[in-house]
Image (tube, rainbow, N blue to C red):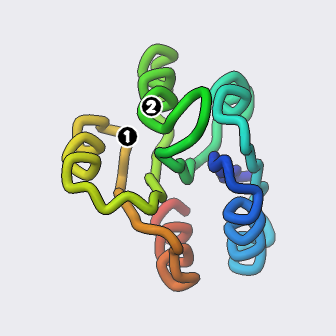
């Protein structure tokens, strides 16, 4: 079974994304985390097909999460979901080979469907 990991400190954002993904493809297992440190700790065990990652989070932000993935040699596909409109953030994300796309919140259901289709 393919797994999608949601890493966002907003329970509401995770709830909405989980609902959208489940409605689009019931066969996917969706793991959601509001604690990015915990998500990083379970990453190798879960080994998700793709990750939707927020950048601005307490304790361990999205950039630190990506660095942690590199340290663990994890190359899971990552879609950055953020409310940031910073061009510097967009450019910085391109330095990570596993970052597929830098997307602004909220993400339309059609976009999520296209991402899931591309990952299958």
Q: State the quadrant of the C terminus.
A: bottom right
Residue 4 in picture, x, y percent from top left: 66, 53
On screen, residue 32 versus residue 120, left or right, reads right
Q: Which residue is mark 2?
A: 66
- Which sits earlier in the primary sequence, circle 1 or circle 2? 2
On screen, residue 76 versus residue 24, left or right, reads left
Closest to the observer: 46 or 104? 104
Is mark 1 in CB contact (under 8 Å) with mark 2?
A: yes
Closest to the observer: 93 or 111? 93
Instruction: Tell me the quarter of the picture where residue 86 sits.
Output: bottom left
- Relative to 36, residue 56 above or below: below
The residue at 59%/47% (across/down) is 49
Q: Which residue is mark 1?
A: 98
Q: Tell me the element at label 1.
A: loop
Q: CA distance from mark 1 to mark 2?
A: 9 Å
Residue 70 in picture, x, y percent from top left: 42, 22
On screen, residue 49 versus residue 99, left or right, reads right
The residue at 37%/40% (across/down) is 98
Instruction: Tell me the quarter of the picture where residue 38 sits.
Output: top right
Closest to the observer: 60 or 39? 60
């Amino acid at each position: 079974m393919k797994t999608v990991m949601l890493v966002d400190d907003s329970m509401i954002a995770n709830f909405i994304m989980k609902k959208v993904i489940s409605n689009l493809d019931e066969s996917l297992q969706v793991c959601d985390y509001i604690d990015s440190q915990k998500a990083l700790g379970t990453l190798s065990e879960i080994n998700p097909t793709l990750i939707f990652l927020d950048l601005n989070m307490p304790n361990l932000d999205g950039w630190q999460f990506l660095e942690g993935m590199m340290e663990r040699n994890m190359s899971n596909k990552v879609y950055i979901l953020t409310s940031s409109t910073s061009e510097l953030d967009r450019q910085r994300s391109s330095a990570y080979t596993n970052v597929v796309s830098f997307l602004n919140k909220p993400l339309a259901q059609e976009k999520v469907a296209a991402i899931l289709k591309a990952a299958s």
